Amino acid sequence: QVQLVESGGGLVQAGGSLRLSCEWSGRIFRFTRFGWFRQAPGSQRESVAFFNANGVSNVGDSVKDRFTISRDGAKNTMYLQMNNLKPEDSAVYFCNANVLSTHPGNFWGPGTQVTVSS
């Protein structure tokens, strides 16, 4: 079984930065997608950034020049560096792993709240 836990959310002023972390437990050997989603109140959950099955990073157009995704396998942690935050970035951010092996399944963390004040 894979478990994901996010941390690093909080309240920040517009223009500020936050780094989110997603720590995983359980072995993630092969996956189709491993990354971050966000969901604002009244909105659908949207993809923010992810690694594809080849380990290549993809970042959404709305955050492309401001957000960076990375991961440290030695620490079992994935990161989302968010710079120049805007009020419209306010949302609950979720870590997601669509795992093929060792433990197949689509796993989600509980989420971490990011609030950007204007």
Image: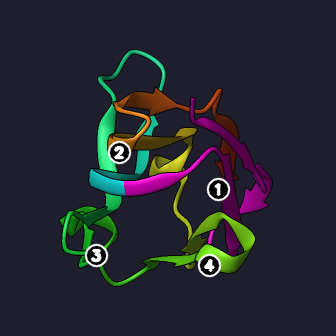
Contact? badges 1 and 4 (CB < 8 Å): no
- Looking at the rendered structure, the kind of residue marked 3 is Gly
Residue 114 on the magenta segment: no
**Left or right: 93 in relation to 30:** right
**N-terminal label among 4 and 2:** 4
Residue 20 on the magenta segment: yes
Which one is in front in this view, the residue at disc 4 or the one at disc 2?
Answer: 2
Contact? badges 1 and 3 (CB < 8 Å): no
- Looking at the rendered structure, the kind of residue marked 1 is Ser
Q: Where does label 4 land, which residue? A: 72
Separation of marks 3 and 2 at Cα, in angstroms: 15 Å
Residue 118 — which label?
1
**N-terminal label among 1 and 4:** 4
- Residue shown at the point (69%, 38%) measured from the top left: 113
Which one is in front in this view, the residue at disc 1 or the one at disc 4?
Answer: 4
Q: Where does label 2 land, which residue? A: 101
Which portion, as a residue range, is magenta? Answer: 1-29
Q: Where does label 3 land, which residue? A: 55
Residue at the far top in the pictured view: 42
**Left or right: 47 in relation to 88:** left
Q: Position of residue 91 (x, y in %)?
A: 54, 38
**Left or right: 66 in relation to 78:** left
Q: Residues within 10 Å of mark 4 (few under 14, many from 20)?
A: few
- Residue shown at the point (69%, 60%) measured from the top left: 21
